[in-house]
Image (cartoon, helix red, strand yellow):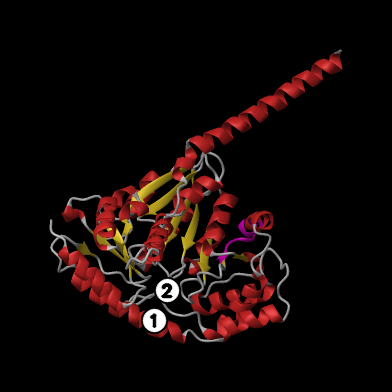
Amino acid sequence: MLLAFKFLIKARKICSKLFELIISICEFLTIESKLIKASPTLKLGEIARQKQSEGEDVLSLALGEPDFLTPKYILDATSKAMYDGFTHYSTPQGLLELRTAIKNDYVKRFSAKYSEDEIIIFPGAKAAIFAALSALLEPNDEVIIISPYYVSYPPMIKLAEYKTKSIDIPLNEDFSLPINKIKSVITNNTKVLILNYPNNPTGQLLSKDEMREIAKIISSYKNLYLIADEIYEKLVFSNDKFISFAGFEEIKDKTIIINGYSKSYAMTGFRIGYALASKEVIYKMNLFNQNTNTNTNTFVQKGVLSIYENGDDHLNEYNKTLSFRTNYLHEEINKIPYLTGIKPKGGFYYFVNISKTKMKSVVFANLLLNNYNLVVTPGIAFGNSFDNHIRVPLSTEIDNLKRAIEILRKLSF
């Protein structure tokens, strides 16, 4: 009788825990998932493609991807790897030879000291960010994101740990980093600060002084980590030089560097990125990778190795092209009475201020889409504080930018 009673008590506890889990899942699906929406940039790209399939002449400036061909040496190396039999599983952490190449590259460019055990390969930089968040976040943690931000940060945070609180800190009006505001919102629950530089969508870079301040902040809090999304680091066309957080030895164990090949090598469809972090964090990210992706495409990893055996000559020309387009767009945008903009230094976007139109960004974008078949990305996609902006990519032919300017000049407010 006593054994039966104990069993009933234990069963009740199990059922109670199961009930709590079901309630939590229901809460996530009915409430929190409202934040997990379709990517606005991808959605707009689909609208453009639908219109084009119906025979309409659409000027789509929604998606951001490089408009040059993937270097031939990468295609050749990837193809060769397939025919050489690299079409099977590989280690979840990534091919050792690729991790060694990344390690050597970071030593050469940033004097950063990482071992192969502190590097992991993922199917894209986005997957690496998600794995880092999943490895770090626990219920009731806080994540600071700086707006305007990459559109997938908020959904990824919720998917990684739905009981996490996101704190949105807008950039200053000149798009400089609001260091004091960041300091003011940090609590004992703050676990992660996400920074993306060169920034999407503003195109700005961090100064060395700003980076030193961030390093001090990260050092000052025992449980605070920095996720540095540096995917656009090779697309810099100003006189400024990109500096990686990988070079800040004092916060190495509390920093996760995110990078990849999509933007700099026109490999968006290949889906391959990587992360550098402490062994402890990489171990957790590797567990995530094992149980979700299994491994990153093996022959693509072999193809990527060719990057470290060849130069980046294509980037010299492309950055000149981006600079030319930037100068043109910056000059023309600021000639239009109801538009203004701050000149970007890197990446391939121009963030246009439309506040003088007195229109919300979605309304303005719909006006361009419905009346002129011009697709741009509403600023609201990058944070609530930027509903008075639109994003225009620089990764398109100059003739397309000229067509867009002609359309924008037609409007009157």
Kind of residue sitting beneath label 2: Pro
* Residue at 25% over, 72% down: 403
Residue at horizontal 40%, vertical 75%? 235
Q: Which mark is residue 72?
A: none
Q: Which residue is mark 1?
A: 318
| Total tally of numbered discs in the picture | 2
Describe the element under mark 2 as helix, strand or loop: loop
Image location (x, y in percent) of residue 191:
50, 48
Closest to the observer: 323 or 368? Answer: 368
Q: Residue furthest top?
A: 1
> What x and y, as percent, mark residue 116?
65, 70
Say few, some or many: other residues with alpha carbon within 10 Å of mark 1 (under 14 / 14 to 19 / 20 or more): some
Residue tagged 2: 66
The reply to whether the C-beta atoms of the residues labelled 1 and 2 are less than 8 Å apart is yes
Query: Which residues fall within the magenta stretch?
Result: 274-283
> For the C terminus, which image quadrant?
bottom left
Going from N to C along the chain, the mark reached first, 1 or 2, is: 2
- In the rendered image of this protein, does residue 395 appear above or below residue 7? below
